[in-house]
Image (cartoon, helix red, strand yellow):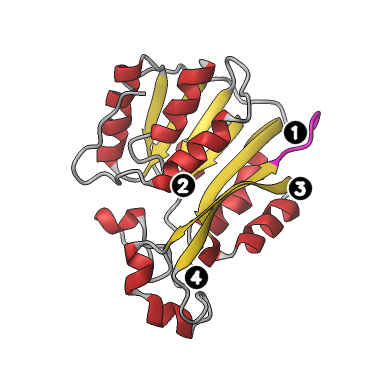
Amino acid sequence: MRGMVFPGVFQPRSDTWLLAAAASSAAVPVGERILELCAGPGFAGLTVALAARASLTTVDVSRRAVWNVRLNARLNGVRARALHGDLFAAVPGERFDMILANPPYVPGTAPPARGAARAWEAGGDGRALLDRICAAAPARLLPGGCLLIVHSEVCGEQRTLDAFTQGGLEADVVMRERGPLGPLLRARRGELEARGLLSPGQKHEDVVVLRGRAPVGTGKPLAPRPPVLADG
């Protein structure tokens, strides 16, 4: 896949490619509807859409990220809608076969209203956006559709799985990757250890892709499909 990252847009890291690999392994049928939340430059969604010739919609709070996705879609010949907005508010009434999300998940301060830190600051427990996505996504899946979210174990792997189950989804872990703590977690190690989010002396973390699958043959009728254009 071809692509570039604009200055000020979140630079994809290993978790982005882990999410893309998990989504690609799901064998998405041609023409399915994919939504990527917290998309940044859109690499995870574009990877899947390119392979499956799927219909892609991306959402991000950064206008620069929206323009970045539009360029990357053109570079790869993918027909994509890149929207500016706050999670599902950008796609009112729409439902999807697959929803991907690599939300901010670093425990620390409340998500700022603007600036680059919106890409990683996720509240005291790292779940400011995670919990919102888990709560709203089940109603936005088509029958048999799946939700894939990537985040660190530090944010509570079981909490996400429990949220999927409470939303009526079949929950499991589809990918796991062990690696050194990232620079932000290392910088906050003392605080996170004191709060029980890291074990004393912990130097590594698991990054996991968690899946919630909707039951087949249930759900409300789909809203009319909007046109899908690379230039938004």
Mark pair 2, 1: CA separation: 25 Å
Whichever of labels 4 and 1 marks the residue nearer the N terminus, that label is: 4
Point 35% across, 43% down: residue:
12
Whichever of labels 2 and 1 marks the residue nearer the N terminus, that label is: 2
Q: Residue 74: which disc?
A: none
Residue located beneath label 4 in the image:
125
The spot of residue 174 in percent (x, y) is 64, 44
Residue located beneath label 2 in the image:
102
The residue at the far left in this view is: 7
* Mark closer to the observer (3, 1): 3
Residue located beneath label 1 in the image:
219
Mark pair 4, 1: CA separation: 32 Å
Q: Secondary structure at mark 3?
A: loop
Is 14 rendered above or below residue 4? below
- The one of 208 and 200 positioned closer to us in this rendering: 200
Residue located beneath label 3 in the image:
168
Membership of 179 in magenta stretch: no
- Amino acid at pointer 1: Gly
Q: Main secondary structure of the magenta part?
A: loop
* Mark closer to the observer (4, 1): 4
Point 49% across, 35% down: residue:
20
Q: Secondary structure at mark 2?
A: loop
